[in-house]
Amino acid sequence: MATQPTQLKQTHNARLIGIGNAAMDLVSVVPSDADIARLGLKKGHCVFLSDAEAEALTAAIEAWGIDYVPGGSAANVLSCFAALGGGGRFVGKTAPDESGRRFSESMTQWGIAYDTVPTDNQCGSTRIFTIVTPDGERSFAASYGASHAIAESDLRADDMRDSAMLLIDGYMLMSDNGPNVLRHAIAMAQDMARPVVFLPADLSVIEAKPDDTEFLMQAANAVICNAEQAIALTGAGGVDEAVDMFRQRNLFGCVTLGAEGVLAFEAAAIHRVENPYQPDMIVSTNGAGDNFSGGFLYGLLHGMGMVQACRLGMYCALEILKHQSPRPQTSLAHLIESV
């Protein structure tokens, strides 16, 4: 198994398989931070809603307008990966409703293989409320719906065999059967010597599911997270200490630091990589971390070193800051030449 980035060249192809929420983002821009509190949200974090609470929140934000945008962390990563020219497969559960249809179309338009059978449970597709304040920061609320119905049978052995790497979305820990499916996927990946990349979720998930989160940390070969997540995952006193603790686990990956760049780490070294430029304007940060991950993983699986792959990820993240959607709007293949 490729336990460090230099070994990824030995994998048989460059396809990425990801497991996550097949989510529709409901994006709304609110006038001020005070509105976040009035909606019962926590700025920069995610809260989890019942179906009734989701309906109430939808009604509360309608006055500000709602954009319905396909999302979900792993799906966003795969969309960026595909927009760069990579091949991939997504596994995630929808309901047979309009949101599910739109999500499916959003994946196949980039050539991402997606054929998970919709649930027949009486529930809607997963909704992720993305509430954006004037500073571009986003706060989340999630109603998981169909995601609770994901099953081990939704992941086929041939799909794993045809992929070079497994991407695990930490938000799946809040799905009723998500933890079981992730354990099944990891066992399959390990049997086939496929490296596992863990994208940790919001702090609320890390705190709510500490045992499951620790299992994913032990099973992963790589982790991509922000500074807040890195400290929460390790209990470290700061980012540098957290990176040291990741390396002690024989992990490679990245800690994103916003305007301060990225700390990339592997067994051989720690790399401090600066942003290639500072954006003139930020429309929304929604999806920036996911698109960094998509670019970074594309780079690694296509022969780039850690620093070069980081730079590609940064260019992808900077591109996504220019609009509200958490996914690329056009091909990103031209960004490869920038690194």
Image (tube, grey):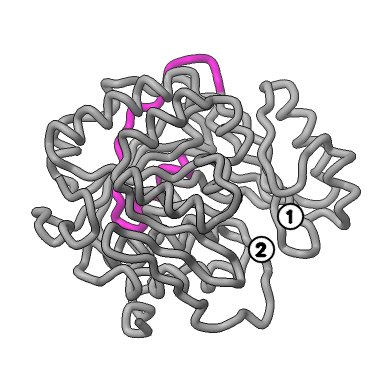
Q: Is residue 227 visible?
A: yes
Location of residue 176 in the rendering, given as x and y in whole percent from the top left corner: 49, 18
For badge 2, the amino acid type reads Ser
Measuring 80% from the left and 43% from the top, which residue is drawn there?
61
From the image, give the main secondary structure of the stretch colored magenta: loop
**Residue contact between numbered discs 1 and 2, judged by CB atoms under 8 Å:** yes
Mark 2 Cα within 10 Å, few/some/many (few <14, many 20+)? many
Q: Which residue is mark 1?
A: 132
Q: Is residue 63 left or right of residue 198?
A: right
Q: Is residue 106 visible?
A: no
Location of residue 161 in the rendering, given as x and y in whole percent from the top left corner: 13, 40
Residue 110 lies in magenta, yes or no?
Answer: yes
Indicate whether 304 appears above or below 169: below
Indicate whether 192 appears above or below 296: above
Q: Which residue is mark 2?
A: 284
Measuring 45% from the left and 63% from the top, which residue is drawn there?
292
Location of residue 190 in the rendering, given as x and y in whole percent from the top left corner: 18, 34
Q: Is residue 149 left or right of residue 31?
A: left
Q: Which picture quadrant has residue 158?
A: top left
Viewer-proximal residue among 295 and 253: 253
Residue 294 lies in magenta, yes or no?
Answer: no
For badge 1, the amino acid type reads Val
Q: Which picture quadrant has residue 154?
A: top left
Q: Secondary structure at mark 2?
A: loop
Indicate whether 297 appears above or below 212: below
Magenta region: 101-123
Q: Secondary structure at mark 1?
A: strand
